[in-house]
Structure formats: C-alpha cells, structure tokens
Image (spheres, rainbow, N blue to C red):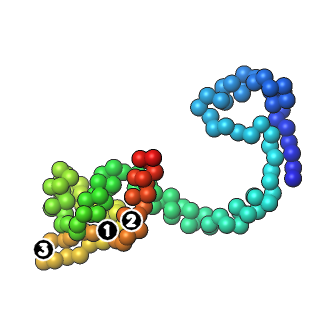
Amino acid sequence: MRRRFAGDTAGRTGIPNEKEKKMAVGEVECCDLTEVHEDKVRMVSSSMPKEDLLYDLAELFKVFGDSTRIRILFALFEAEICVCDLAETLNMTQSAVSHQLRILKQARLVKSRRDGKSVYYSLDDDHVATIINMGLEHIEE
C-alpha cells in the first residue's frame, strides 16, 4: 500500500487553507490522504468492460438523453402505433417523429413493421421498458 500526504498542512492541522475552501464549494469531496488500495484497484480493473463496450453503452445512454425520444418510448409502452398516430399523440409533425424514430431504431430500442401503407412501431424488447422504469424509479426516490 502506498501513502502520500497532500502538500499543504490543512490535513495535518485541521485548518483548511484557501485552496481547500475554494475546492469545497461545488467540488466532489476527496480523501485528505492519498492511499492506493492496490487489491481494490486490481479487482475493479479486472472486471472493467473493454473500452469499445463502454463507448457503446455511453452512446446508448445518449439516446435516452432527449425528452422527445423518452416521450416516444412512453407512448410505445402502451401500444404498437403508427407514425401518424404517434405524431398526433405527441403533437409533432410526422417528419419530426420519423427523425427521432430513426435514432431509436439505430440504437435498437424500437422496431417497425409495415402493414399495407402504414408503418407501425413498437419497443424492440422488454429491456427498453426496464431501463426507462428503473430510471424513473431512481428519480422518484
């Protein structure tokens, strides 16, 4: 285990210096003493997914970062619905809805099927509803 002390005396005297006062406002709390727990670093590092997988996960969550797309997903929780009905429900143009549906489809969150001249959209699988419901539960706590 390696130990390093901060270069200032505040950690040892208990009196914060000006730098520490500034960092305390709006900053994340940090340890007063840098102590690397190498066993935990190894454990976490060995279970960390590969960088390309983390990138793909971040891209997926970016898709959830738009309230219009969230509204579309909520509408699709209720029923498979065609683009015109979805546009009417959300008080949007079909073009705007189609643009958002294309993004959701590329992220494999929704799927479509054609029935004659209509195209119907639905959630791609149950995972989509689970992700949204878990997020909603988290913010309602």
- Label 3 Cα crowd, 10 Å radius (few <14 / some 14-19 / many 20+): few
CB under 8 Å between callouts 1 and 2?
Answer: yes
What element does badge 2 sit on? helix
- Label 1 Cα crowd, 10 Å radius (few <14 / some 14-19 / many 20+): many
Q: Quick one: 15 or 68, which is closer to the camera?
A: 15
Name the residue type under label 1. Leu
Spot occupied by residue 121 in the image (x, y as percentages of width and height): 25, 68
33 relative to 109 in the view: left or right:
right
Q: Is residue 8 above or below residue 49?
A: above
Q: Quick one: 3 or 84, which is closer to the camera?
A: 3
24 relative to 9 in the view: left or right:
left
Q: Which residue is mark 1?
A: 123
Separation (CA) of disc 2 from disc 3: 27 Å
Residue 41 appears in the rendering: yes
Which corner quadrant of the image does residue 78 belong to? bottom left
Q: Which residue is mark 3?
A: 117
